[in-house]
Each structure stands twice: as C-alpha cells, then as structure tokens.
Image (spheres, coloured by chain):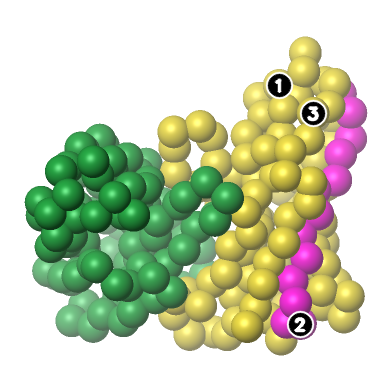
C-alpha cells in the first residue's frame, strides 16, 4: 500500500530564503506526483504535476523534482515571500485511471516571516 | 468562473441527524471526488465518480452515500451522523490529470 510522508510537518523561514520541502513515497510505481497548496480555510490548489517519465517541473519560483528510484520528490521555492505561507501537500497517483488512487501526504505548514 | 462550488460552508448536526452536502462544477469535468480532511490524518478519499452514472468507494466510505446526479453535480449524504464524521469535507473535480477543489464544508457532529 502506497504511503506518502512529508517531513517536516512545519517550517518557519525568514523572507528571501530559498527552501526545500520534502515528500517521500513507499511504492516507486507511480503514475505521477502532484504538489498542492492549501491556504487556511480554503481548498487545495494544484501547483505542479510531474509525470513518472519526467524528472522535474518548473513554474515561476517553484521547481518540483521527482526521483522514483529513491521514492522522493522535492518542492524548491526560491526567494520565499510572506505570501508563500501556506500548507503544501504532495500526492502520488498509482496509475493512469481515475484519480481515485491519489494518496496524499499530511503536508508541510510553511511560515515565511517578513 | 465559479469552478467547484460546495454548500453549505458550515454545518452543525446532532448525532443521528441526516444531511446532504452539495457539490457542483461548471468545468465540464468527467470525474468528481469527495474527500475528508482531519488533523493528523491528511486527506482521505470517501467516494469518487469517474463519469456520470458511476460511483466507486474510496478509502473511507462507511457511513456515507453519494449520488452523481448529472455531469455537474455530485452529492454526499450522511444518513445518520456520528461524532466521528466531524471533519472538513472537500469536493473536487478533474478532467484527467489535475484536481480542482472546492473551498470545503466544515461539519461538526455533536
């Protein structure tokens, strides 16, 4: 059974710092891996999606990498800003069918201090 | 640009009461999902519907029923609410790869 772990559960950094959020998964046979952002009291917003055949994806100051062999994905945030404060979740999908097989991590709560 | 709309946003029930959570999407997505989010447990799938007319159980379906009324609407029903169903409920839809979430329903069962 796929398990997705995110460490640390919470992270506090000063504004401007580059940071890395970690996501590990136990079953390397994944179809893709997604990173989401969740603001307090809100739903999740998809940030980046990496297909199993890809190594990384970039969007603005965000870069997500995927290493299936080691069961790890990282989300790199460059030049962090207070507006980046949120909970970041990763989710691994097992196959190309319905996303009913999407397994979420519990998230890393990021706080960027001005 | 409504996206995924959930109603109500907040609800308090007494044990044993029933209610239906409503979800509608205007993006013409085939697939729709119901998740619950609990502290320390993360997001867990309750039920999903890969297309209009089909529904399937997720990880935690006990105590819930769903109806895919049409392509737009996917409702979640609690027939006899229990305190263990106190949670934040999220509806989501997907064309294939990406998930689009509603803003959630905070449900408390006393």
Between disc 1 and disc 2, the foreground one is 2
In x, y percent, where is residue A3? 67, 72
In x, y percent, where is residue B27? 31, 58
Task: State which tag comes first along the sequence, 1 or 2.
Answer: 2
Residue at the spot of label 1: A82
Query: Is residue B68 rendered magenta in the image?
Result: no
Chain B tint as drawn = green
* Chain for colour yellow: A
- The segment highlighted magenta reads A16-28
Whole-angstrom CA distance, mark 1 to mark 3, is: 11 Å
**Label 2 crowd bin: few (<14), some (14–19), many (20+), radius 10 Å:** some
- At a point 51% along the width and 32% down the height, the residue shown is A40
Instruction: Place residue B42 in its image quadrant.
Output: bottom right
Q: Secondary structure at mark 1?
A: helix
Residue at the spot of label 2: A28
To the question of a shared chain for discs 1 and 3, the answer is: yes
Question: What chain does mark 3 sit on?
Answer: A
Residue B67 lies left or right of residue B10; in this view the side is left
To the question of a shared chain for discs 1 and 2, the answer is: yes
Query: Is residue A19 rendered magenta in the image?
Result: yes
Task: State which tag comes first along the sequence, 2 or 3.
Answer: 3
Residue at the spot of label 3: A12
Q: Secondary structure at mark 2?
A: loop
Depth check, front residue: B1 or A103: A103
Q: Is residue B92 visible?
A: no
- At a point 59% along the width and 44% down the height, the residue shown is A37
């Amino acid at each position: 059974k796929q398990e997705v772990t995110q460490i640390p559960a919470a992270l506090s950094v000063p504004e401007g710092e580059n940071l890395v959020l970690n996501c590990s998964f136990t079953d390397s046979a994944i179809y893709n891996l997604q990173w989401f952002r969740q603001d307090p009291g809100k739903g999740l917003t998809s940030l980046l999606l990496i297909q199993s055949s890809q190594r990384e994806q970039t969007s603005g100051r965000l870069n997500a990498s995927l290493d299936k062999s080691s069961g790890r994905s990282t989300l790199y945030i460059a030049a962090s800003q207070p507006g980046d404060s949120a909970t970041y979740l990763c989710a691994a999908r097992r196959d190309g069918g319905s996303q009913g097989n999407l397994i979420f991590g519990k998230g890393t709560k990021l706080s960027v201090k001005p | 640009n409504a996206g995924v709309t959930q109603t109500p946003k907040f609800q308090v029930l007494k044990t044993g009461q029933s209610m239906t959570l409503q979800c509608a999407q205007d993006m013409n997505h085939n697939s729709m999902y119901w998740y619950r989010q609990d502290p320390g447990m993360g997001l867990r799938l309750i039920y999903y519907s890969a297309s209009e007319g089909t529904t399937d159980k997720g990880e935690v379906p006990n105590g819930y029923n769903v109806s895919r009324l049409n392509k737009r609407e996917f409702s979640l029903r609690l027939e006899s609410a229990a305190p263990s169903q106190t949670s934040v409920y999220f509806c989501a839809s997907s064309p294939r790869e990406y998930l689009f979430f509603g803003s959630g329903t905070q449900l408390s069962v006393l």
